Image (cartoon, rainbow, N blue to C red):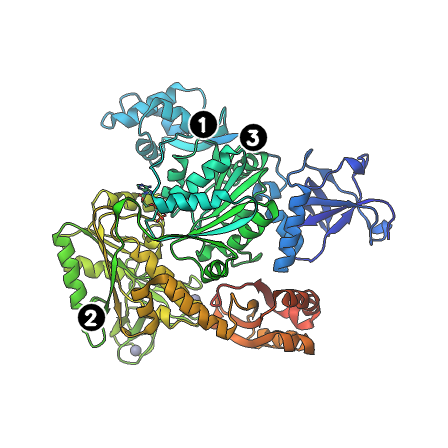
Amino acid sequence: MSNNPVIRVAVAVPLRALFDYLPPEGVNIGDLKPGIRLRVPFGRGERIAVLVEVVQQSEVAPELLKPVRQVLDESPLLESSYIEFLRWVAGYYHHPSGEVILSALPVYLRKGEPLVEKIEKAWQLTESGRALGPDQLKRAPRQQQIMQFMQSQQDSVSRQQLSENFDNFQAPLKVLVDKGFLQQTEKTKEQIPGHSTSPPPSLAVQQQQAVNSVLQQSGFQVSLLYGVTGSGKTEVYVAIANEILARGQQVMILVPEIALTPQLVSRIQARVSELLVTLHSGLSERERAYAWQEAVSGRARLVIGTRSAVFTPLLQTGLIIVDEEHDPSYKQQEGFRYSARDMAVALGKEKNCPVVLGSATPSFESLQNAYRRNYQLLKMTERAGNASLPSIELIDIRSVRLDGGFSPVTRRLIAEELEKDNQVMAFLNRRGYAPVLTCHDCGWVSQCHRCDARMTLHAGKNRLWCHHCGHQQPVPPKCPECGQQNLITLGQGTEQIEAVLNRYFPDASCVRIDHDSTRKKGSMHEKLDAIKEGKHQLLVGTQMLAKGHDFPDVTLVVVMDVDAGFYGTDFRSSERMSQLLMQVAGRAGRADKSGRVVIQTRHPDHPLLHLLIQQGYEAFSRQALQEREQACFPPYGFQVLIRAEASQADLPETFLEAAHKLADKPAKEAIDFWGPVPAAMQRKKGVHRFHLLLQTASRAGLHDFLHQWLPEIERLPQAKKVRWSIDIDPQDFYS
Ligand code: ADP
Ligand code: ZN
Ligand code: ZN
């Protein structure tokens, strides 16, 4: 035990502890403030640490204390109160606090790099670009102009400089990069450009009411903005945000995936006159660190970001908005398994500011909070600008001969819309050509050798591909089992739907949007633009198509297969399916064209499906919530999932059994232990996986139990032989 003051730091290691150090030689401990970064010796190596606090004495023997190697920051990057918040978060998720605290820093700064100077994207000449003669590129005058400009400059040229000299330079610039005359680089920013403003539309009554209801409240208050697709939620966010900005506070807006919702960002950008930054995975580490610094320093007033942006310690948080709050991507599924939506609410409470959760299909958890009046429910039932909501119908495909997945009725409906020059969208949440390849003679199926799953046939690439582990192999020319050449496909994927539509309607142009067809950077954008411009009449896609895009000329949406979702393996399957269905349906019919949605199903009498279609999402949620209440499922109960995996089949189960045995009698009376059971996909990537689920009605009791139980599990000899993890409020039981 040491009686001199020591520095207590957080280090990103999987240990539930903070670590004590001495100040570096010649540094006064009083000059070291919580929130600065330090370089410390750790084990045989070195780590970047964040100073959490200075404590008056240490449990560690003085001779074991080591001095800090280097102080990296003059002033704190994280405030003390924010570090306390992060420690609370770590406690809530039972995750090592060092990892949680360090995760609040951008990766670049986590590596100990110095703060980033102002930087921005720029372009410079390549070797061949410099050598390009004045007469080359004569047939492409715009490219030629840009090259002449670039050659006249001493230095690299920023986007800002290009836009001052050229209109619409993006396309020719891209071509010049592709041709290898220019390359992208970064340069120091002289000045942060302001953003343009465009006048807001006058808000509809429901929009204005929602805005007023949020702004009337002072302090912490969660509002659930439940607005049907097209009701104009973005304008509501912007109106509230602008008022909070005018009060001199900062605003945080969380979105599920920026790459899929570029429209949202540009729409917000066009309405806000203060500096905003975006934080997402498309940025380089330096760009991201720079944007983070702008937000933390308070220079940037508005931050738009994906999941991890919730841990951006803004200087003056005045409002937090979570768009599409039901989206599963808010839950981190690896390592520190937090829910950004839930943490947004916790942060709002901490900062005593309003939180707005928006969705056309709110999560049932949030709806229940609204029904119980923990959250303020703000409903917008009408579409903005006179657009009407689509009608939804079921098409019974029992005993109907499907051709390529389409019923004859569906085909006729599509033909009718095409004749009227409208667009049609076919939705199927399964990519590839067919989910199974099988032998008609012996019954061989395209099983993945590493997973309990079938490999999907991708016809374009002529490969079998496991979507769970990524394993790929060429399509066998004949059956690997019996050698006959009688391999057939079962079921459909989007690739096949596209092929079938091309066969039916050779005069119409069909575009497919899924992960395979949009791998190339920018191709998503190009396809969306082409759809807007009416270059395609037929749209085929997975849930990528269902997210956030407006397709004003789509008048018919065909949902190819709804049944799997209603018979899924976990209690959230029907919630997810209904959300997806309502979101897909929401793409149809905007402005002056009304929309129609048809759903092909083999269970046209399914009561939940009927309830959803006839009485809508809210009635559906109330019914589903009642069922959950009876089973004590979330949000009525609280769950914790312990996952364990190992390549040896029996180890995960043995470990979880031992863990279960550690629980004492009072715990077993208060908490339901389910399992150990094999995961829904027991073998994945050659690894065997088991689950132990804990469920109880008392969250506090559950957390107390975990605090005592988890350290005991860690000490189990069986724990060393498996990979295991803890998931608080688990969302996904499949992965
Ligand atoms: P949501 O996010 O609720 O689905 P959006 O914010 O995308 O809806 O708005 C749908 C469409 O309605 C957009 O094209 C938007 O510009 C338009 N819109 C929103 N509010 C108004 C308004 N008050 N007047 C006219 N058009 C509006
Ligand atoms: Zn065979
Ligand atoms: Zn696999």
Quadrant observed for ligand 2 in the rendered image: bottom left
Whether the residue under disc 2 has CB within 8 Å of ligand 2: no
Residue 184 in the image: state x and y as whole percent.
42, 33
Q: Is residue 648 above or below residue 161?
A: below
The answer to whether residue 374 is left or right of residue 545 is right
| Residue picked out by circle 2 | 402
Q: Residue at x 29, y 27 (%)?
A: 143
The reply to whether residue 679 is visible in this rendering is no
Kind of residue sitting beneath label 2: Leu
| Mark closer to the observer (1, 2) | 1
| Mark closer to the observer (1, 3) | 1
Q: For mark 2, give the secondary structure.
A: loop
Q: For mark 1, give the secondary structure.
A: loop
| Residue picked out by circle 3 | 117
Q: Is residue 128 above or below residue 653?
A: above
Kind of residue sitting beneath label 1: Pro
Q: Residue at x 77, y 35 (%)?
A: 31
Kind of residue sitting beneath label 3: Glu
